[in-house]
Amino acid sequence: MSENTMKRSKFASFWVIGLIINLGLILGLYYTEGTIGIDDFSDNISLPLYTIIPGILVLLGIWSITISSRIKEIQKKSLILLVVSFTLWFAAEQTWNLYEHVLDIDPYPSIADFFYLAAPITMFFSLVLFLKPFKKQISKKIIVFASIISIVVLIPTLIATYTFGIEGNFFEIFIALLYPIVDSILLVPAIVAISFTILNKRNLFWGGILIGILVLIAADVIFLFAVIDDTYVDGHPVDILFISSYTVWMFVMYYIINNSRFGNKKEVSITENKKYKINKFEKYGVIITIITINVMVGIILISMNYYLETNPEENITTYFSWTLIMLVVIFSSFVIVLNSKLNITLQKRSRILEKTTENLVKAERFSAIGTLASRLAHDLRNPLGIIMTSNSMIKKKSTDEQILKNTEFISRSVNRMEHQINNVLDFVRVHPIKIEESSIHELIYDSLKNMKIPEGILIIKPENDLKIQCDKEQFLIVLYNIILNGVQKLDKTGKIIIECESKDNQNIIKIQDSGKDIPEDLMEKVFEPLFTTKHQGTGLGLASCKQIIHEHQGTIHVENNPTTFVIKIPREITK
Amino acid sequence: MKKIVIVDDEIDYTEILKDFCEMSNMEVVGVGHNGQDAVNLCKEHLPDFLLLDLSMPEFDGFFALENIKKSNVNVKIIILTGLLTESSIKNLEKYEVFETLIKPVDPNTVIEKINSV
């Protein structure tokens, strides 16, 4: 461990202890005010603290801005907004103090309300700026989760505020309603940031800022109920919460200023750790929800008891019932959503598994069929060779017309068998494609070389030549099959027109025949393996074409009127 | 008259091919049925052309190709095979082969190829 790291961890532990002692001191003073001779907690402790702590907070904030280049925990813009929000809170507290204790007036709405509302909004933007670089790493789920929690807080307090404010005019109600709304808006990025920083990486600065926000929002809610209840006086226990959140912020500001002295970049910056993704939500989502809901229900039940004990005459139970109902509804819907998400994931995975197994079985079967077909091809081609050679021999030796006619039949039958064997082999064999540049003219010439074309059929080759990237052998199979398909369809008379062009990074080859249209319902089927309308076909010719074109990262389809096979392959084939 | 050696494990095929070649004014100096035969016949007769099958029992066509290459016999080789797999295409690239034809081959094509030289 380096000296710096040691210094830092020592400082961090002092820092935490200092914070706890500080908070403990405030709490201790509150509960022991009578026994240690402080008559009034509010006048002697909480009121000065409302000035001192936010004051120190603002000073520390300004200090941190001056050295912001050395601060690694937060970007400068975000830091400035954060300090502005601290200043607004300071201003709010001072204005309120001025009204309540110096001028002894209680205006509502006042400039203090403006500061109180502006502060969390500024802090919201500071958080958003902080989270912006991590936009891609934050899942939508966590935002939904944060929104749900903020709605849990918003709805009951909104109802309570509205009911309380109903006595005032529209503007007063509006200002009163703004408090819970602003708080819940702030809660969304706060929860997102908490899940981001605390779940993934320990970061005292952001941990502190966010705990402060949560405490402040809790304080606002309790304050609101106390005001509705008319039980709020200076020195109310909720003051401790407000002071605590300012204290925590004060400590974190001091922490980053101090931390900037340690030059070690390794552990501090979370902006450097961009690879980290929030995928823990799925893992911890249910647990966090259950804990949050339980804690909230617990708090509500305890405060309900407290209120009912101190104010038995107040009918405060309505608000609490609303809150509880909201909690249960949101909790249930959240669990349902999570559960359905889980189900969808499960279904997706099992579908993938099924597909993989199916493909594996298919591949295995295909490889077995491939071996069988190869063996069969070899075993059939040898005797075919003998038949063909013998036939040629007979043809050469004989002058008998009947015999010559018969040798022609044998020759044609052998060709048919050869073609069928080739069809099956082309389909079952898996070739890795070897890309080379070939000319369309040459390819067409080669594919027509071994084809017997009746005299009545005219084949019109493209005028322009095109250099295309393809596996020559494989592409010949495609052209051969499609042209042969056309020739067989034409039945001795007609035209086959081949055209080619280069467009939008694609080479397009069109093979058109003047034969009958393909019935609409068969347009897709012609490329399916084993589909054939011919008595002599294997149903593998066009299927092989499709397979080969796919291997060339291209597409093939057929259009009618006139029947045209359209092949599109990319100009450059990526390996 | 061109001197030819025919090697194929299908006896009937060698017979009929021999007849056809002779009828087309070629001199068939030897007929064999495996790779070893091909090597021996080529060394012995120094033919112009060797018509060679690839898959044969014991010593296959590649055995013949390898040993003919080693023995520096100058013979043009025409492969006549029933099955050309990816691996055999790759293997064939190592040798100087005049022509590769897949069965069933029209014997007239073979004669044309031989006469083209």
Image: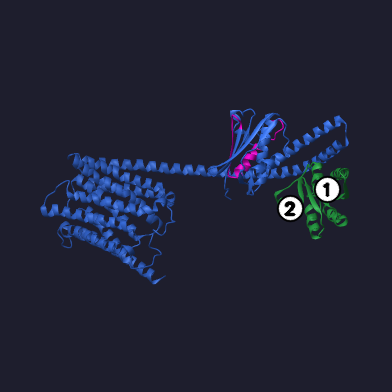
Q: Nearer the viewer, mark 2 or mark 1?
A: 2
User: Depth check: A67 or A99 in front?
Assistant: A67
Q: Is residue A402 left or right of residue A192?
A: right
Residue with the most extreme bottom position: A3
Query: Which subunit holds the residue at mark 1?
Result: B
Q: Residue at x 38, y 41 (%)?
A: A332
Dot 2 falls on a residue whose secondary structure is helix
Residue A60 rendering spot, x and y as whole percentages: 26, 62
Chain A's colour is: blue
Q: Which residues are magenta?
A: A534-563
Amino acid type, label 2? Leu
In magenta stretch: residue A560: yes
Task: Write down the quadrant of residue A317 in the picture.
Answer: top left
User: Depth check: A196 or B87 in front?
Assistant: B87
* Residue corresponding to mark 1: B9
Chain B's colour is: green
User: Depth check: A192 or A473 in front?
Assistant: A473
Amino acid type, label 1? Asp
Query: Which subunit holds the residue at mark 2?
Result: B
Dot 1 falls on a residue whose secondary structure is loop
Q: Residue B92 has which mark? A: 2
In the picture shown, does residue A265 fall above or below A238?
Answer: below
Residue with the most extreme left position: A103
In magenta stretch: residue A104: no
Residue A182 rendering spot, x and y as whole percentages: 27, 47
Residue B90 rendering spot, x and y as whole percentages: 71, 52
Q: Residue B61 has which mark? A: none
Disc 2: CA contacts within 10 A as few (<14), some (14-19) or many (>=20)? some
Q: Is residue B64 left or right of residue A491?
A: right
